[in-house]
Amino acid sequence: MLLTGARGFTGIYVREELERAGYTVVGAIVGAAAGPHEVTLDITAPDNCRRVMEKVRPDYLVHLAAISFVQHADAEAFYRVNVIGTLNLLQAIADAGLSPRCVLVASSANIYGNARADQITEAQPPQPVNHYAVSKLAMEHMVRTWSDRMPIVLTRPFNYTGVGQEPHFLIPKIVSHFVQRAPVIELGNLDVERDFSDVRMVANAYRRLIEEAPAGEVFNICSGRGHTLGGVLDMMSAIAGYTIDVRVNPAFTRANEVKRLVGSAEKLQRAVGQVATYPLESTLDWMYNA
């Protein structure tokens, strides 16, 4: 199995999940490979992609490598990495004459934008509002042109978090302030509601989808429960034993902020059964005490 983004936040947990289940995982990384089960891969370089596919000849591909920070400064990079990079991987599979059992490609629930559904299903028409979301939607359309040549599963993960997520993401930022017992935290839009899952649930869902290989399908990866920012802060106050002063910093606000993003996990559950679930409170406690 080839796993792109193997050293990223999600990749570390996905690799652990797959190896526990008995898979031999070759991690594709940017930079020098450090062991026998790692390869150097620049997905924006077609020749490099072909060499890796010919060397590893994977039965499965789990493609997580992407630019995933919505506020990334280089807009063009979203398309070069998220769209063209994915195209390079699929072309390399074909060029190497491989017939993988499953190709799982991670998209994003950000493609839904400001949907007005209580729980967003996979049938919700996309309304992307930023370059990250547009690049992921373009990637999905591109990937579907390959669906007659290989068994591809698309996932749309909603927000998720856990130990090891970079501190510029919202939940790690909040948790780190409480760990440091900071008196004040500066945040952006406070009137947002998100479906926060645990990264360990995401890893479990990916493994289950690989094993079921429902080719040509797209799945939300989510808890089905929404949490307001105020609710998250209240949970952290209870865990840490004090209340933090919250201030809105205009520099952190976005005019096109998605206000509510909560998904339906019904299709995922029908396909793979019940995946591992973690209440947000327990995830926050895990992160706080790590």
Image (cartoon, helix red, strand yellow):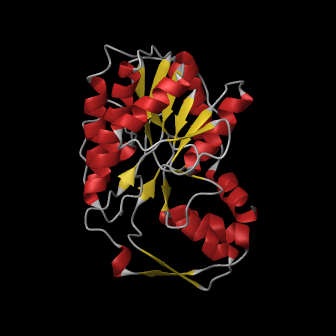
As drawn, 135 above or below 22: below
Q: Look at the image and tell me whether residue 112 can be seen.
A: no
Percent across and percent down for residue 154 are 40, 29
- Residue at point 38% right, 70% down? 189
Q: Look at the image and tell me whether residue 235 can be seen.
A: yes
285 sits to left or right of 62: right
Query: For this rendering, which residue is in front, 197 or 101?
Result: 101
Percent across and percent down for residue 42 are 43, 44
279 sits to left or right of 227: right
141 sits to left or right of 3: left
Marker count (numbered): 0
- Residue at point 37% right, 53% down? 260
Query: For this rendering, which residue is in front, 71 or 48?
Result: 48
Tell me the quadrant of the picture where the N terminus can be found.
Answer: top right
- Residue at point 30% right, 37% down? 139
Quadrant of the rendered image containing residue 249:
bottom left
- Residue at point 57% right, 69% down? 174
Percent across and percent down for residue 95 are 36, 21
Percent across and percent down for residue 58 are 54, 23
Tell me the quadrant of the picture where the C terminus can be found.
Answer: bottom right
